[in-house]
Image (tube, grey):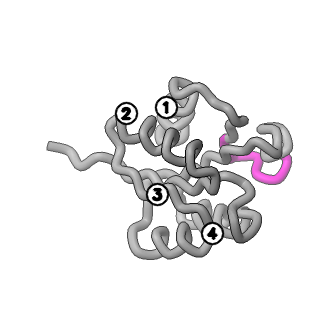
Amino acid sequence: METPLRVLVAEDELIIGTDLCDTVQEAGYLVEGPFDDIAAAALSFQKNKPDLAILDVQLGDGIVYPLAEQMMAENVPVIFHSGQLSPEEVHRRFPLARALAKPCPPAEVIQTMQDALEG
């Protein structure tokens, strides 16, 4: 049996984070999170490099961009999930990253994950 892919979720809004993790887990992935701050997400990333990360742009302790840059430098696909910035605004800074606006239907989250993993 193949090991499920690991997805790191960083989201500081508890209900959204829990819902997002449930969506990812129900799709057959292993979930790390939800982490509500950059420090916890970075520690998880250092311990177990994920296959994919879904990151809220603004977490409890700041903007997630430096962590996202580190992940992308290590070839971890990143999906930005934000209620504050539009996907177009995210694409201006990270042209190769994917972005979802909150709220986002579960089917769109899963499709975006599959697209990101396929490269």
C-alpha distance separating marks 3 and 2: 16 Å
C-alpha distance separating marks 2 and 4: 25 Å
Residue corresponding to mark 3: 33
Residue corresponding to mark 1: 110
- The part of the chain drawn in magenta is 91-98
Could you tell me how many numbered marks the image carries? 4
Residue corresponding to mark 4: 38
Q: Residues within 10 Å of mark 2 (few under 14, many from 20)?
A: few
Amino acid at pointer 1: Ile
Q: Is residue 100 above or below residue 106?
A: below
Q: Residue at x 57, y 51 (%)?
A: 14
Q: Are marks 3 and 2 in contact (CB under 8 Å)?
A: no
Q: Earlier in the sequence, mark 1 or mark 4?
A: 4
Lateral position of residue 78 relative to residue 30, left or right: right
C-alpha distance separating marks 1 and 4: 23 Å
Q: Is residue 16 visible?
A: yes
Q: Position of residue 48 (x, y in %)?
A: 39, 68
C-alpha distance separating marks 3 and 4: 12 Å
Front position among marks 1 and 4: 4
